[in-house]
Amino acid sequence: MYYVPDGTVKCGFYECSSCGNRFLDIRIAPSLVCPYCGEEADMELGPDDEMPDTAESAKLIKMLEGEEVKEYDTLLSLAITGGDYNWI
């Protein structure tokens, strides 16, 4: 699969309010940091460094289970690959 590992039976379907991208993630939470426009916090900070702000702009639209995971992953990946079925 494209967004989640093969055999995933439960995942979250998210949409970023900043960039508008939709994606799947195996983590299920009300909001996540967008993998496209967000930036994960760097946990290797020095004593004089400030903790960076992380904006969780991707909101959970729907929790997917079972066959829905494979269907949504296929549909979203076709949008990214431009309908190229060769990678499947």
Image (cartoon, helix red, strand yellow):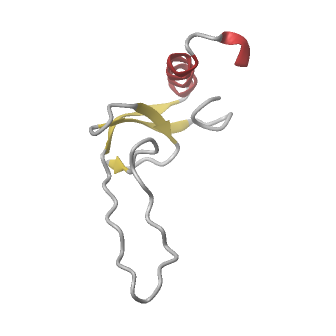
- Where is the N terminus found, in terms of image quarters? top right
Compared to residue 86, the image places residue 2 above or below, namely below
16 lies left or right of 69:
left
In the foreground, 63 or 45: 45
x and y percentages locating residue 53 in the rendered image: 31, 65
**Residue 46 percent across, percent down from the top left:** 47, 84
Percent position (x, y) of residue 11? 49, 39
Residue at x 45%, y 58% (from the top left corner): 40
Q: Is residue 62 above or below residue 84?
A: below
Query: As displayed, is residue 73 above or below residue 13?
Result: above
- Could you say where residue 8 lies in the image, as x and y percent from the top left? 61, 37
Asked whether residue 88 is in view, the answer is: no
The furthest residue to the bottom: 47
Instruction: Say which residue appears at 43% left-offset and 65% top-offset.
Output: 41
On screen, residue 35 versus residue 16, left or right, reads right
| Residue at the image point whose x is 42% and y is 55% from the top | 39
Farthest residue, direction front: 48
Q: Is residue 50 left or right of residue 70?
A: left
Give the quarter of the image for residue 51: bottom left
**Closer to the camera in the image, 25 or 84:** 84
Q: Taking the image as drawn, is residue 66 in sight?
A: yes
79, 25: nearer the viewer: 79
Question: Which quadrant, please, contains the C terminus?
Answer: top right
